Image (cartoon, coloured by chain):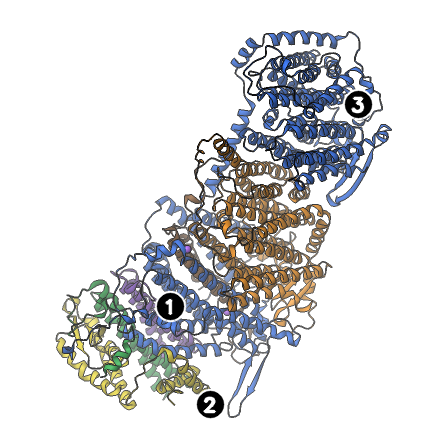
Amino acid sequence: MNHFIIAPVLLPAIIGGLIILWMRHDLLLQRVFSTVGSVLLLGAALYLAFHASTGEVFVYRLGNWPAPFGIVLMLDRLAGMMLVLTAFLGLVVQLYAIGSGWDRKGWHFHALWQFQMMGVMGAFLTGDAFNLFVFFEVLLIASYGLMIHGGGPLRLRAGVQYVVINLIGSTLFLAALGTLYAVTGTLNMADMAIKVAALPLSDTAVLRTGAVLLMLVFAIKAALVPLHFWLPSTYANAPGPVAALFAIMSKVGVYSIIRFYTLVFPGDSAVETLVSDMLLPAALITLIVGQVGVLGGRHLGRVAAMSAIASIGTLVIAVSMFTPESISAALYYTIHSTLTGAALFLIADMIAARRGGDLWLTLRPKIQNSGLIAAMFFAAAIAAAGLPPMSGFIGKLLVLDATRLDPWWVGIWATILITSLFAIVGFGRAGSTLFWLPFQLQRIEQQAAAEGRPAPQSPIPPKLEPDEHIQDIGDAVSPTLTFAATGTLLAGLVALTVFAGPALRMTDSIADQLFSPHPYVESVLVNQEGARP
Amino acid sequence: MIAYALTFAFACFGIALLFNLYRVVIAPGVPDRILALDTMTINMIAMLTLFGLREGTEMYFEASLLFAMVGFVSTVAYAKFILRGDIIE
Amino acid sequence: MSPALIAALPFLGALLPGLLIRSGRNVAAISCGTMTLLALIGLCLHIPAVMDGQVITSSFTWLPRIGLDASFRIDGLSLLFGILILGIGLLIILYARYYLSKGDPVGQFYTYLMLFQGAMMGIVLSDNVLFLLVFWELTSLSSFLLIGYWKHLPEGRQGARMALTVTGMGGLAMIAGMMILGNIAGSYNIGDILQAKEAIQASPLYVPALLLILLGAFTKSAQFPFHFWLPQAMAAPTPVSAYLHSATMVKAGLFLMARLWPVLSGTPEWFYIVATTGLFTMLLGAVIALFKDDLKAILAFSTVSQLGMVTMLLGLGTEAGVIAAVFHIINHATFKAALFMTAGIVDHEAGTRSMKLLGGLRKLMPITFIIGTIAALSMAGVFPLNGFISKEMMLDDAIHTSWAGHPQLFGIIAAIAATFSVAYSLRFISGTFLGPVRDDYPHHPHDPGLGLLFSPGLLVVLVVLIGLMPMTMAGWLVTASANAVTGAATEPDLALWHGVNAPLLISGAALVIGALMVAFHRPLQRIWDALPRPEAKTIFDAVIRRAVRWAQAVNDGLHDGRLARGAGMMAATIVLAGTFAWITGRAGPETRAMLPISPVAAIGFVLLIVATACMVVFHRNRLLALVLIGIVGLIVSCAFVYLSAPDLALTQISVEVVTVMLMLLALNFLPKVTWVETGGLRRGADALIATMVGLAFGGLAYAIMRRDFAFDTISQYHIANSYKQGGGDNIVNVTLVDFRGYDTFGEITVLGIAALVIYAMTETLLIGKSARKLANWRHDQKRAGDRHPLMLVVATRLILPISLTVGLFIFMRGHNQPGGGFVAGLIVAISLLMQYMASGFAWAQERQRVPFHAMIGAGVIVAAATGMGAWFFGVPFLTSAYGYFKLPFLEEFELATAMAFDLGVFLCVVGAVMLALNSLSRIARRTGESTNRPATNQAPPAVPKEAH
Amino acid sequence: MDLFFEILVSALLVIGGFFGLVGSYGLVKLPDPMTRLHGPTKSATLGVGGVLLASMIYFAWFGAAPSLHELLITLFILLTAPVTGLMIAKANIHLQWTRDELPPTGTGTNWATLSDRPSLMDDGADLRLVDEGD
Amino acid sequence: MSRLFPHPILSALLVVTWLLLVNDFRWGSLVFGMILGLVIPLFIKPYWPYRSTLKSLPKYASYMLLVFWDIIVANIQVARIVLFKPNSQLKPAWIVIPLDIRTPEAITVLAGTITLTPGTVSCDLSECGHALLVHCLHAPDPAAVVADIKTRYESRLKEIFA
Amino acid sequence: MEALVAIAIGAMSASGIYLVLRLRTFPVVIGMTMMSYAINLFLVATGRLAINKPPILQNHGAPDFSAYTDPLPQALTLTAIVISFGMTAVVVLLSLGAYIEGGDDYIDMPESDRREDGNAE
Ligand code: NA
Ligand code: NA
């Protein structure tokens, strides 16, 4: 164990560094190194998660400085789960990116990918509030690069907006951290928890302000309404695999909310239920806005993006209860929505690659591999809409179950269920337009051909001229690999459904650990053998 | 005596800075603004030095030195921009 | 056979057609049929036990924490529905084999069909309401696929979506209802729920739960006002219609009402909601069916009506009602499946289903005629067919029911509905088969082969046999299932003949009047057509269309791509939430005295405020805005010096100059002016938000500055140990490279990545469309001569070594004095940039031997390697060490690993800054600007001799 | 002796402050961009120079150890001020002056700022200048 | 030797710079400064390809003193003009100084001197580098200024730069 | 003094936000720069103000905590400055790229991001 905790951060950092140092001009080498790196990363994540699953909390004191004076890395069950989820998603989506040829649409794809992994992993592992900021920035800057990978006017414009909004978010993050430091005098999360608990009543205003500002930072990352405006254009315009990877990015925000508001600012601290009181209505509105977006979608990318927003809404509803059951449900839903969101974006990318980069939900000729892609879309849409037999249904049941004791339960249930209908109708329309409508065109053409008439012009001529920033099926290195990668995500969803029991046992144990933070604090601050004086 | 001289110098450079700012904002052309900014940097160095003198510390020497360097570079960059549009060509 | 396996077999069957997709229709049909048959046999093996009153259960834990288990049960009700689903399923599989053409994707069809069958079996075999919900929704999904099977038909797609929407909606409501039910009962297990009647009916949540569950049941069973989806679903291939709408999908709702009958029924709410809805639906469906010309539409509305009848019977809450309901479920399944198949045969053979184009097929298709007629007569409730018996039972129940004090109302409406049933049934026969043979059928109709005739034929035989020997044929099943529903142990008396009683008279009258109505159909149709009536489908379509439009409007309006919208909302939210958090907390007195304002500070403050204000006022002049940014940066740097933060001052000022250079490089392309494009109102609103932010942020800062820390800050440790443990006097630097070196590691990575991103984007801009745009770029600015002024070149060449020395000094001294790797890196980068500016890109680039990429990579790796070096001493990443060394004749000097780390920082900074600016300037060179190197072939300016 | 240095330092401070102010005042007062250029490039150099000199002497005499590093800043400013002036002057010429308004070079060639030929320092011109010799 | 010390004067300058930066004489600093004086010129050699050398260091030092004195005088003169001469009485003028010196370094030093001294700013060079454009703040007699510059500075520089 | 710093922070952040709410990329970027100045000053302020107490040890130890301002916020600010520099560099180039590719320097997404003519089902 010992030094192994830092492996998920250093491994991608070094691989990324090596790629830019020696392999800048050799894509094949980059692919090999990057893939091997991702496999190793997954291995490391599994190893760490396995160790964390015993319930022990592992602390790594960087620079051997005693906490709270230096920075510590923290590995508990929650971190372990997030590491595995990230590494799994990273590997699978990376294979998709290779298979689809996206990684050769521009420079430095693999290096940025590795750094992206580094940032996310670092964020999950850190036990220091400011260090969380730093790794947020690492993951953000890498995400900027990935988001605009391949270029193109819309993508770049959306990229500008994405960056600007996140710059505001980063500014806010600093303001929140400054405020919290000003009142607690510490940056270590465990230490901050102790200080918050012991805070004299006269200082609560500053503390509460800091806590709420911090929550808003995470809410921006998680794209909670009304802080979500950056998401639709960003996700819809990002390259498919990148948008798929972004499925984990919004979870970083949710993770941070869970981490901070169970450990540092629990409901019995001076912050009281302020944060959960703000989160719940926001989450409900987020869910509505997201599902309305799915219902009114004109573009598959945006439908998927709005669905991602909706999933955040559901997730945060559960989080905002801040009970062990609800956090457990939220964690289950996190896994589900990460895989689902990623799958949706990969499928959208497969469609785009066969439609000349066009994802408008309008009549287009039938695409290649229509049946298989349709089946995948159907599965992913079912998962996203929360219908059985996919895990979305179980996730929804868990969230409903976790909220049944809340005074607002009627409103929560009604929102969740009614907006599910929006999703059903929206995805139904999308699927029907994408996969069924072309048959009508095909039939008309076939009939015309049979009768010797010239085929009628399709209502809108297909755009099949590949532009450099558009992914085309002709650019794919291995379409099979793209199907395999997407299928793996869907298989993950199936597994999450079938093994919902064990999965929930895991998330239950995570939640239990989160709600008894004493051992965590103790392992950070008390057991400091070996650290410098 | 030094204290009075210091105060005088502070006042002079303070007013000078205000003149500079005026010229940055109200100017018929960009070169004037750049000139004013450059002068401002120089005056700032003087202020920093005076401050160090008053506080009896030389901790701020590096800052002054860097101000001098940076003021030069940015002035050249602005001028080059006006002259050529492209500052690195 | 285990109930779980019975439920699983159809799903296994669903895999087969996919696997055997190339083998054709026979293989698919046989494999699916085999699976269905196996399941049916497996189910039938349980008949004896069920008849004994046993309930066979098996259970697998799935999600024990919330009580979702994969539990199965077989009781009489499950048995009844299971036999219908599998038995009719088997016939449909056979029928479909001959119905579908070669061109249809048969594999898909059978897969969907088996999925659907499995889902239905799941519903009826579930012993856990949450588990039941899984299958419930699965039927919606698989029926969506089945209805939309003919993708090229708009009606198919619309019908599929409509069915999905309506039944999906019901399913969602049912989730809530079931969860409430389970919460009241304390278990989701059906066996447990069925025991909790008192608790459930006493609960204040009984009515909501009832409504929600009924919403699910009614939508699925196409009860008014959710009846409209069913006729639209007729766009599906006929085998699908026959299956979904006779025996399965629509019966799921009935099944559910029967399943929960013991705990939900018996209350006035139940009676008034269920029975009334059923009665009205029965009437409505029957009336509409009479005026449809499409055979399948007639059957569809008749299904609506018949389902209404069963619903009504269940709604009565009486044992007799249940028995009649259960019996009619069987009867309806037999004759309706046969009728759909008949309609399918007619469609298949004659090429149309419209009665306007049909008639006279009696002679051309005699066998079909017989089958169809018997089935239709059963539907009409004609003696001695099975439909007759259950209809009599229904009428008997209805006339004995009093509705809200009206003893006759129920019976009368039921009788009217029965009359219309007779009418549409007879019209089905006459319009299709009777009358003169026509010569304008689209195809040449004749009886099909046995493949198509077998299934309906068999069903018609059952229709007759059940009618003649109800107890023998169906009594046992009705008994078992009715007892399973009611929990009683009675033996129902099913008989063809009960003597001349009121129901019989009503039936007789209905037959006569019905026949008359068919005879006078034309005038009736004219009246019907003239009647203003809401068309449910139109309404639904309009609702959906409006909903979608509304959603689009909301979505477009909300996510209109305006950054200011998002940023403004964000700012306002932050301020409001932060202020709220502040005012709900407590802020103690200001404990720190204010520091006096020195004149220096005052001057700096005035400068800053004026510059900031000017920035807002004059920002449209972009170059001026940059100059102002320079001023603000300068003053902020000075403020850092003033506020005892020399390191910050150094960093801020050097970062600022590089930023300005970057922006100048970009401004070379961008417009030089920002035009006024926003109205006064908008600017006012923006100013308001900005003011709010300023006040809040400044206020927060003020509040913090005036208060002391509540606790000792951790930085006291840093002050105490900076030299002792970190070996440096500059606490900030020691913090950066040692106490919090890991942050710095992340930070240089950020910088390196930023440069990579910039480089990658530049590369992308230099290819394709954008490259063509750049090649034809016309700069809007007049250019002066003399790119590389001589004095500048000479001066920068002299400055370079000096500033490198300064950079080195700052680097070396950083551990103890202001400075460090970062500032040093910037100084070196700036001095290199000076060369680029003065002597030109190509000239400077030629002299640049280390690639910037490599510097970044090396920087990150040096920093990481320094950190990992600690591992060899068994201490964590980034654990530093330092020592003092002495060389002969010289003073003691210090070496620290932190310096190596700082070197990584230095390399990364130089590499990143240079790579970023380089990339930007490469864009400029792509716009056709020549460089000074390739220009060497140009002749130097001639020097006229006379000048000397 | 202390008094002497006190007077010296004070005088330098007053001189520095005075010239600093005059230079910046010139920037405001003088009539056109070219004349305004004269103010700061000269007066400001002596202004900041005086202050730096004062600081140097102050710390050398009154401080713990002799300190000369202000000299470095002074030299740096003296080195760069002419270049700054030149660049701004060129900018002014570029924006506001034409060939006809400027005096002829007397060499038959154009002023560099208004020229459209490659720069003197491009294509190895420095080498050429060396070859021409003095 | 010249390969090792491409710019001996520069090396010396760097040693001085280093000592000034350290601001505290120690032998270790001197040694380190000398190392820098050795290494940095090697490093920047490609950036300074055509060195021209100073012929006479003492002459250069005396030139520096002269310029230093002129700067003080100039400041007083300019201050008087700025403070007391109304703008209407100002006689700004362009003057052209034909150059005899050729090396870039010499031209630069001359131009720098002109800018730093009384009421004059070097503004531009001719394309060929043989004439210097100077702007005078107040020059009732431009020819005199030209002559003054040529004799007072350029002639000295010609002797200093090889 | 505290009041002045607070007003300065407020003024810079207000002008920053105002500029961020403009329609073109350039003022937005400038606004972000203003915001980052404000936040840097704020971070320093969270360590409370101190004049001429730079966190540089005078005689290696025997620390007198009151002789030095809080070094930690300064270290954090340094990191923040560096990071925001990287971010600014990216956004500057990104807005340039968007301008070159898109033909205008509006920051809002064009209509073509949201709409296309045609009939969905
Ligand atoms: Na740093
Ligand atoms: Na391009």
Spot the blue chain and give its letter. C
Calculate the distance from the C-alpha at mark 2 to the C-alpha at mark 3. 112 Å
Q: Which residue is mark 2?
A: E27
Q: Colour of chain E?
A: yellow
Report the chain holding disc 3. Answer: C
The residue under label 3 is C478
Residue placed most toward the observer, F38 or C14: C14
Camera-nearest label, 2 or 1: 2
Q: Which residue is mark 1?
A: C599
Chain A is which colour?
Answer: orange
Chain D shade in the render? green
Q: Are marks 2 and 3 on the same chain?
A: no
* Secondary element at image label 2: helix
How far apart in space, not on screen, are marks 1 and 3 (Cα)? 101 Å
Chain letter behind tag 1: C
Where is residue A256 drawn, in percent x and y? 60, 55
Q: The disc labelled 3 sits on which kind of residue?
A: Val
Q: Residues within 10 Å of mark 3 (few under 14, many from 20)?
A: many
Which colour denotes chain F? Answer: brown
